[in-house]
Image (cartoon, rainbow, N blue to C red):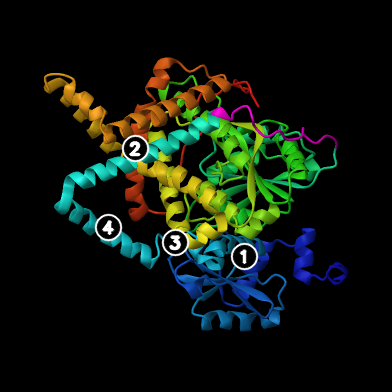
Amino acid sequence: MRLASQEGLSPAEALIKKGFLDAEKYCWTVAGHLRAHYARFGSLKICQKGKEQKKILKYSGGLLVPAVDTHGKDVLAISPVGLDLTKLPQLLRAAKDRGGKPVIVTPEHLHQLAVTATGTLHLADQSPLASANRRMTSTQVTVLALSPSMFFLGILLDVTGLFFASLIALKGTAIALGAIRLISLWNRRRQEVLPPPVSGNDLPRYTVLVPLYNEQEICKQIVEAIQKLDYPKDKLEVIFLVEAHDETTLKALMKVLPSYMRFFLLPAGHPRTKPRALAAGLSVTKGAYVTVFDAEDRPEPDQLRKAVAAFRYLPQSVGCLQASLSIDHADEGWLVRQFAFEYAALFDLLLPWFSQKRTFLPLGGTSNHFRRKALQQTGGWDPYNVTEDADLGLRLKRNGFETVKLTSTTYEEAPTTLTAWFSQRTRWHKGWIQTLAVHLREPFKLYKETGIFDLTIFLIWMGGGLFCLFLGPLTLICLAYLIVLSLFSGGFAPFIELVLSPLGLLGASSAVIGLVGSMSATYAAAKMRGLEPKAWEIATLPLYWVLSSAATWKAGWEFFSRPHHWRKTAHGIAKRPTGPSIEVIT
C-alpha cells in the first residue's frame, strides 16, 4: 500500500510491479468474479471493419479497445489493472451498450492492442488522402473507368496514330530516364562531403527498429550485426517487431536477445505488412533519432555515429538520411549480379545526385535514419503501402523536410531465385503504383508542396519508370518489326529510311541516351563498388528489364485484386561471407 500511494498506483498495479502478483492470473480471476470472458494474449485481432468500431473509447478512466475474437465476433478489450473495481461493472455495461462483447485482458495485452490499432490507422484517420488504405478516389475511379473506352475509341479512329503516340511517349520517357542517369554519372565525383563520425559518448538516444516475420533462420545474424554497432549500449534502444502468432521467430529471437534489446509483439490484424509493424513500433520508442534495419542487414559499425554527425552538421530541415545498400554475395549467378548492379547504380550514383539537388529522394526500405519529429510531423509509415519507403520519401518532401545521402553502407541479401526475385519486384512495383495513385489524388496541391523540379523528378523517375516497364512489350514489337523489315525488304533501304525519319531519330536518341546511358551508369557504379562487371553482363541488362516488365504487369493486376498483400521475401538463403566482401567507396 505504501508503494501504491508513493507512486500513484493501485494496489494491484503495485503488487504486479513488484512481482508479488501475476497479471494474467489476476485478470483471469477478476473476469471469473464478474462472469466476463477472459482473452489470453494472441487470441484477439485488431478490429478494422467500420469507422465507429475502429475508435478506441475512454470510459471512467479505462480504455475500451475494439478487437475481434477467435470466432470473428466484435469485442471490446478491457484491463481491470489500475481501475476502481467497484466501477468495473459499469465499464462492462458501457461496452455492451457500444455493441461489443466485453472481454478482460492483461494490461500488456491491452497496450499492444491499443498501440497497434492506433499506429495502423493513424495516417488513414489523420490524412485520409495520404494513405493507400483506399486504392483510389472517386475521381480516379471515374477516369480509370473511362480509359478503356477512350483507348478503344482511339483504335477505331486511328489505330496507327495511337500506336505511334504511345511509341513517342515511351521513347521520350526513356530519354528522360537515361538523361537522369547520365547526369548522375557526370556528377559522381561531386558528392556532398559530410563530417566524420562523432567520437566520444556525447550522443543522443538512438532507436533501432527491426521488423521480423518468419525470420527464425536469421535472428542470430541480425542481433550480432546490431551488437557490432559502435554506439553506447545505454543510449541504444533496439526493438524487434514480431507478429504475435510468429512463435518460431520469437523463440529463435529469445535465445540470442541481449538484455539491452527488447521485442514488441503485434496482435494479428490487417494489413500484415512491414510498415504496419513500424507504425506501431514508433509509438513505443523514445529515441531522438530512429532508424530501420531489415533482418538480413549488416550495417557498418560506425553508421549511427556518422548519422548523428550529419544531423548535427545539416540544418533542421533535413529530416532523413539514407545510407547505401549493397549486395555482399554478388557472385551467386547472373540474377544476383544484376540486382547488385542495380543497387550500385541507385545508391551510389542516382541518390547522391538527388541528395545534392535536395530533390525528392526515393528511400530504400532500410538504413534510413530519421529525426523523430520529421516522422511524427509527416504521419510516419503508411501500413497500407507495400513500398512504404518511396511513399515516405515523397511525403517528407511535401511536409518541408529534405533527405540527404549518408556516406555509409549496409550490406544486404538479394533474392537468389527467379521466383523470389519476381515476387519481391511485384511488391515493389505495386507499391509504386499505390504511391502514384495516392500522391496524384490532389495534383495541384502536390505541385504547390513540391515545386516544379521535384514534381518533374517524381513523375519521371517513378511514373516514367513504371510507364516504360508497362510498355516494355511495345519495344519488343518494334524491335521485331525492324528485324523482319531488314530480312524481308530485299535490302537495307527501307530500314535506313525508317531510321532517318523523325520517329526513327527519336528511337535512335532513346537507344543512345536511354539504353547506352543506363548501361554506362550501371557499369560505372558497379566498378565503383568493386563488382568488376563483365561486358556480357552489361549487355544483358535489357533482359533484366524484360523480367521487370513482367513483374510490373503482375503488380498492376495485384493493385486491384490484392492491394495490401505483402509478398514476403525469404532470407538466410544466400551464401554470404562472414564479413563485408565489397570495398566501401565513398
Q: Residue at x 77, y 58 (%)?
A: 19
Residue that mark 2 sits on: 171
Q: Residues within 10 Å of mark 4 (few under 14, many from 20)?
A: few
Label 3: which secondary element: loop
Depth check, mark 1 against mark 3: the one in front is: 3
Q: Residues within 10 Å of mark 3 (few under 14, many from 20)?
A: some
Residue 500's spot in the image, x, y percent? Answer: 26, 28
Mark before the other along the chain sequence, 2 or 3: 2
Find the magenta span and give its range: 186-200
The amino acid sitting under disc 2 is Lys
**Mark 3 touches mark 4? (CB < 8 Å):** no
Q: Amino acid at mark 3?
A: Arg
Q: Determine which residue is flagged by label 4.
A: 147
Q: Which residue is mark 3?
A: 441
Q: Earlier in the sequence, mark 2 or mark 4?
A: 4
Q: Residue at x 52, y 44 (%)?
A: 213
Specify the quadrant of the image occupied by residue 471.
top left
In this view, the residue in front, 284 or 427, is 427
Which of labels 2 and 4 is toward the front?
A: 2
Find the distance from the CA under tag 2 to the CA under tag 4: 22 Å
CB atoms of marks 1 and 4 within 8 Å: no
Q: Is residue 369 visible?
A: no
Quarter of the image with the N terminus is: bottom right
How far apart, in angstroms, are the residues tagged by discs 2 and 3? 27 Å
Question: Which residue corresponds to mark 1?
Answer: 110
